[in-house]
């Protein structure tokens, strides 16, 4: 028994550790050392496919006006694939009064233009249109309830095994609310009425925040000036702007003040 313990202790003492692999030592006349090679840090390969870069979408709310604007550039690597893509659209849920009033005089067409829900997207076009169809179905299911529709869309986007692979970001706005939706399940509403997504969104948001308090500038003027600044700084954003505007009867700033007073009373 004593001899067995002594042999075990000797074998343990003669064991060498190389990296995380235990290798028994051999005699000095026949010594073998095993080299352990760790994998190198994975870097960017030159043979990888060019990535599709994003765009710039900006939404500004000021006074009784809501404006969403986006550029038209689609880039793949260092190549401009298309300069005039339409990334801002207006949708009308089925059964709404805006959808039914498609014909008539010019005044009626103007009312249609100032109603509905505005959607802007950045990312994969096919993924964005898939989410756009889902949002339309949610608005039809919950008419006039944009916050609930966005939450239900984000919930399905997060949990559905097919939708969770969609790579896009959405800006959604109506006469009362504006939200940013992401694939992580985020439904964000801005505290100052300014939202943006895409590669040049930070430049556009910063410019819009600087201009939001300037007298004489409405939401559309602020949005266009901010996008011009973003296009000068972001190489994936051009000056082919497409915008959609909603004009309401109630001032957005006054409406927010009324809501805050009601919350305090509660």
Image: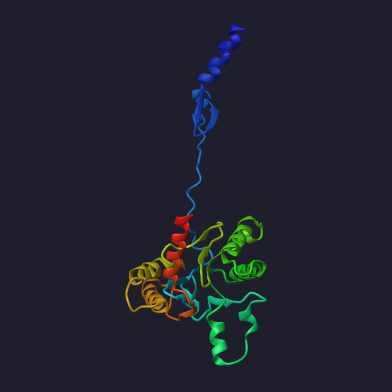
Instruction: Tell me if residue 139 can be seen.
Output: yes
Q: Position of residue 90 (x, y in %)?
A: 56, 77
Q: How many marks?
A: 0
Q: Quadrant of residue 217?
A: bottom left
What residue do we see at 52% from left, 79% from top? Answer: 85
Residue farthest along the top direction in this orientation: 2
Instruction: Tell me if residue 198 can be seen.
Output: no
Q: Position of residue 57 (x, y in %)?
A: 47, 71
Indicate whether 191 appears above or below 99: above
Q: Is residue 133 left or right of residue 81?
A: right
Residue farthest along the front direction in this orientation: 265
Indicate whether 57 appears above or below 29: below
Q: Quadrant of residue 192?
A: bottom left
What residue do we see at 61% from left, 80% from top? Answer: 98
Q: Position of residue 127 (x, y in %)?
A: 60, 68
Closer to the camera, 215 or 253?
Answer: 253
Query: What is the image's colouring?
Result: rainbow
Q: Quadrant of residue 264?
A: bottom left
Indicate whether 206 appears above or below 114: above
Residue farthest along the bottom direction in this orientation: 105
Q: Is residue 157 left or right of residue 190?
A: right
Q: Is residue 257 left or right of residue 32?
A: left
Picture quarter with the N terminus: top right
Closer to the camera, 129 or 180?
Answer: 180
Q: Position of residue 228 (x, y in %)?
A: 38, 77
Q: Is residue 183 left or right of residue 250?
A: right
């Amino acid at each position: 028994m004593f001899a067995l313990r002594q042999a075990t202790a000797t074998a343990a003492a003669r064991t060498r550790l190389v990296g995380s692999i235990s290798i028994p030592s051999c005699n000095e006349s026949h010594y073998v050392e095993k080299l352990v090679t760790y994998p190198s840090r994975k870097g960017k390969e030159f043979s990888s496919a060019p990535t599709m870069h994003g765009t710039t979408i900006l939404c500004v709310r000021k006074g009784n006006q809501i404006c969403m604007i986006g550029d038209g550039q689609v880039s793949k690597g260092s190549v401009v694939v298309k300069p005039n893509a339409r990334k801002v659209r207006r949708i009308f849920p089925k059964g709404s009064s805006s959808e039914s009033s498609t014909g008539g005089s010019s005044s009626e067409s103007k009312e249609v233009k100032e109603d509905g829900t505005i959607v802007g997207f950045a990312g994969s076009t096919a993924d964005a249109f898939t989410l756009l169809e889902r949002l339309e179905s949610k608005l039809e299911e919950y008419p006039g309830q944009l916050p609930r529709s966005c939450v239900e869309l984000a919930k399905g986007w997060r949990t559905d095994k097919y939708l969770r692979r969609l790579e896009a970001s959405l800006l959604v706005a109506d006469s009362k609310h504006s939200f940013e939706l992401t694939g992580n399940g985020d439904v964000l509403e801005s505290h100052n009425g300014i939202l943006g997504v895409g590669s040049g969104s930070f430049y556009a948001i910063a410019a819009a925040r600087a201009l939001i308090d300037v007298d004489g500038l409405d939401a559309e003027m602020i949005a266009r000036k901010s996008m011009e600044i973003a296009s000068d700084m972001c190489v994936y954003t051009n000056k082919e702007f497409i915008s959609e505007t909603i004009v309401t009867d109630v001032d957005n700033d006054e409406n927010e003040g009324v809501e805050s007073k009601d919350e305090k009373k509660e």
